Image: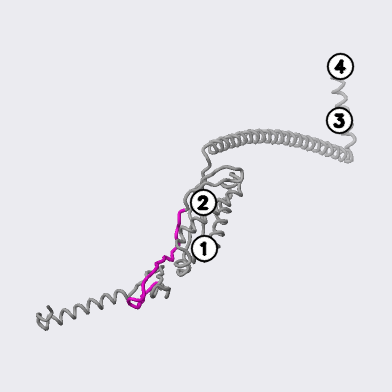
Amino acid sequence: MLAALPTGTVLTIILVGILLFALIIFFKTIRIVPQKQAYIIERLGKYSKTLEAGFHILTPFFDRVAYRHTLKEQAVDVSPQQCITKDNIAVEVDGILYMQVVDPKKASYGINNYQFASAQLAQTTMRSVMGKLELDKTFEERETVNSAIVDAVDKASDPWGVKVTRYEVKNILPPQSIKDAMEKQMRATREKRATIAESEGDRQAKINRAEGEKQQVIAQSEGEKQKRINEAEGRAIEILRVAEATANGIREIAKAINEKGGVNAVNLRIAEQYLDEFGKLAK
């Protein structure tokens, strides 16, 4: 059939075929790995190498991309499961497991599905940890539960090339009867706290009133005391001034007596006062 075609046409068909074959080889050879990803390359069915982010060239027909892994942190939901607490109460618990592939080769050949295996191990550890805690403690010690699960899963997942970064408990759901009892207890606790707060308020108000009255009495007594002190000081000053005036008068009289004619003047003054007093008696 090709013999019937012109020579130029045959050459064109051959060149096109060669070009198509070259393009196929090119696309099978070239691999561009995105950032934060890793490709596992197998050669003739056996592990050959791990390709990191960037441009790579493979051997055509011999090399193939067997696994693709993201190196970003992954969040895996851990399905709700029933756990029995130390005080024999059934609770339903779920959570989120965060992990990251650190060795793509181990993640490819160490286990079939590292996400599923890690989630199952987290559930098993959760049941074990919850069995050591009473119901009230499960709500208070979430951080302890999270740390225990991270330690257990991270240790077990090391051969899988996975690093467990953290675990977060989402919900701890006790039976409805326990919920009702807990709600009643919390309501009673809130009412008790309100009553205590009210009584403390009344007590403090009484203390404040008593303190105010005490300060008022002290202030009044201080005022009365100061008033008496001021009055006493006033009387003392008055007596002192009278005494000073009397002393001054006596000094003047003595001075007058010592002067010339002073004795006669004094005798005359005494006689006048005597006559005045005698006149008053005569009336």
Q: Earlier in the sequence, mark 1 or mark 2?
A: 1
Q: Determine the residue located farthest toward the bottom in the rendered image.
A: 7
Task: Give the CA separation, mark 2 to mark 4.
Answer: 123 Å
Q: Which residue is mark 4?
A: 282
Task: Give the CA separation, mark 3 to mark 1.
Answer: 133 Å
Task: Give the CA separation, mark 2 to mark 3.
Answer: 119 Å
Residue drawn 86% across and 22% down?
A: 277
Residue 91 vs residue 225, the one in the foreground: 91
Q: Which residue is mark 3?
A: 269
Q: Earlier in the sequence, mark 2 or mark 3?
A: 2
Q: Which residues are magenta?
A: 53-77
Give residue 199's position: percent from left, percent from top: 63, 33
Q: Are marks 3 and 1 in contact (CB under 8 Å)?
A: no
Say which of marks 2 and 3 sits in front. 2
* SS assignment at label 1: loop
Position of 18 compared to 159: left or right? left
Residue 270 magenta-drawn?
no
Q: Earlier in the sequence, mark 3 or mark 1?
A: 1
